Amino acid sequence: MKKPEFTADGDASADVIVVGSGIVGGMIADQLVSQGHSVLVLEAGLRIERAQAVENWRNMPFENRAGSDFQGLYPQSEKAPAPLYFPENNYVHLTGPSASSFKQGYLRTVGGTTWHWAASCWRHVPNDFKMKTLYGVGRDWPISYDELEPYYCRAEEEIGVAGPNDPELQSPSERSKPYLMEQVPYGYGDTRFAEIVNPHGYRSVPIPQGRSTRPWNGRPTCCGNNNCQPICPIGAMYNGIAHVERAENKGAVVLAEAVVYKIDTDENNNVTAVHWLDSDKKSHKATGKVFALACNGIETPRLLLMAANEKNPNGIANSSDHVGRNMMDHSGFHCTFIAKEPLWIGRGPAQSSCLVGPRDGDFRKDYSANKMILNNISRVIPATSKALQMGLVGKELDEEIRRRSIFGVDLSISLEPLPDPNNRLTLSTTRKDPHGLPCPDIHYDVGDYVRKGAEAAHKQLEHIGSLFMAEEFNITTSLNANNHIMGGTIMGSDPKDSVVNGECRAHDHANLWLPGGGAIPSSSVVNSTLTMAALGLKAADDMAKKLAGAA
């Protein structure tokens, strides 16, 4: 078992240096330590325990729970803040026409943001890789769906994804292997919703999910407690901590509260070391052979810009001036109504089914695709809030809460942004974190492509509402973030307008990889995590070739 080496003053050396311990960093660490390489993982945030997160959620005030405060139950490092909204901490400063739609929530902690994700494990469809070629908008990937498909399979195996093996229920159906586990069983609401909408041209399919439908790899079977966000109390849902622990068991070392701020390069522009600050603000240095920055779609470009040096005055990996540009997220909105019949939403995982009919087609030449998730989160909290606003008490209050919970529907709609260099992350000149490092500023505009897509989705939703004889039909007017951060270290074949190649290797540095959401060149409309994991595994293979002297 080969391990990193440390000096008496806390400096380190290893074959592989990984910055960030989320799903991508954890998988890379596990892959390479399994091949006999020494691996050091540097994580800016704290290490937490599931039981404490569960207890924090149980004790959270009603206002926070009702407002979906998925950040507040996770303790933060004093030196490495993440965005907070209860109250807001303004760690990320947003400007632009669509500033509020890029209000991201992510964790800086060992295991990453998959502590509180919905566990949706979608693949892009093949056409997503050829947006420019097929539809004349956006960008093409430098790799094809067929090239990434084996890594999608591997990512599904690593995560433990449950999904439908009937091609008619898959999106996409182009698969070389079946899912490892059968899909999470539908609740009554998902079944009945599909029965009503599918005859009218809509396509409701099961969501592939990173949660267990049978005991799997140390995880118990999902018991449907409906608490996936913000924390699965029993660990049936995949979390990045799983790969962190696997890597540690094989000899990898993970350091929490290690804030990387500086990157050294040599005369050939190879990365030679990264520097980090510990909780006492003492600086340390980690030297290595290959380096991966997997700090999520905001923190990675922030670090690259912050680490500018003499040879790279505009930032590491930034000769193209595209680091921090092309920021994307699946801006979305909600549609709520009271249905004509009871649907009993709230049994099972937070999300189980989704309308995918509008995720691809010739219309993408003109406006965004969309997907519509039937949210399966219990409607008791919004029902209670509304009933209290009505001034009800006693028996009438109880009855109204029951009625609204039983008949209530919430659809979450995601829209497809295009990469735009003007949607940009830069470093603040006035705001600093507790280490004195610049905080991120982001300018964002969803663009007319998304706005037209929202209009098309509104018409579809009005029709769906009519099928349920909807009462209190409402579509939210503002677009919300979905925490699917993409594009800031965008992938491409031309080093002049991209940051990394098809292996997520930086064009400017032969031994630096930037895998994860930042590399994604076309957003599609589906959750980005599985694609991030697939890209991480692809990068790990390329790193292994480099270590072997073959690349």
Image (cartoon, grey):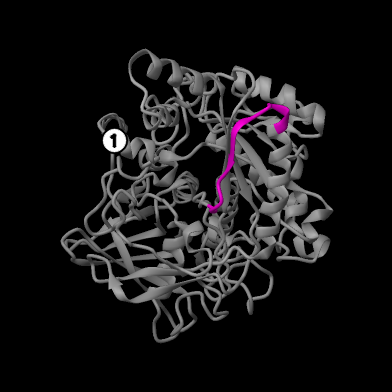
| Amino acid beneath label 1 | Glu
Q: Residue 125 location, x and y as percent? A: 73, 47
Front residue (pair 470, 179): 470
The residue under the point 57% across, 53% down is 331
Q: Which residues are magenta?
A: 466-479
Q: Quadrant of residue 306?
A: bottom left
Which residue occupies 24% across, 71% down?
A: 436
Judging depth in this view, the residue of 427 and 123 nearest the camera is 427
Secondary element at image label 1: loop
As for residue 328 lying within the magenta part, the answer is no
Label 1, residues with CA under 10 Å away: few <14, some 14-19, many ≥20: few
**Whole-percent x, y for residue 145 in the image:** 74, 51
Q: Quadrant of residue 262?
A: bottom left
Residue 517 relative to residue 225: left or right: right
In the drawing, does residue 175 fall left or right of residue 212? right
Q: Exactly how many numbered labels are in the figure?
A: 1
Is 388 located above or below residue 132 in the figure? above
Residue at image position (48%, 79%) is 269
Residue 142 vertical position relative to residue 118 in the rendered view, above or below: below
Quarter of the picture containing the C terminus is bottom right
* Camera sees residue 180: yes
Res 68 quadrant in image? top left
- Can residue 186 be seen here? no
Give the vertical position of 501 relative to 265 (above or below). above
Residue labelled with disc 1 = 49
Residue 456: horizontal and vertical position, in percent? 73, 50
On the image, the x and y values in percent for residue 58 come to 29, 29
In the image, 264 versus 96, the foreground residue is: 96
Camera-nearest residue between 132 and 445: 445
The N terminus sits in image quarter: top left
Q: Residue furthest top?
A: 395
Up/down of 199 relative to 436, above or below: above
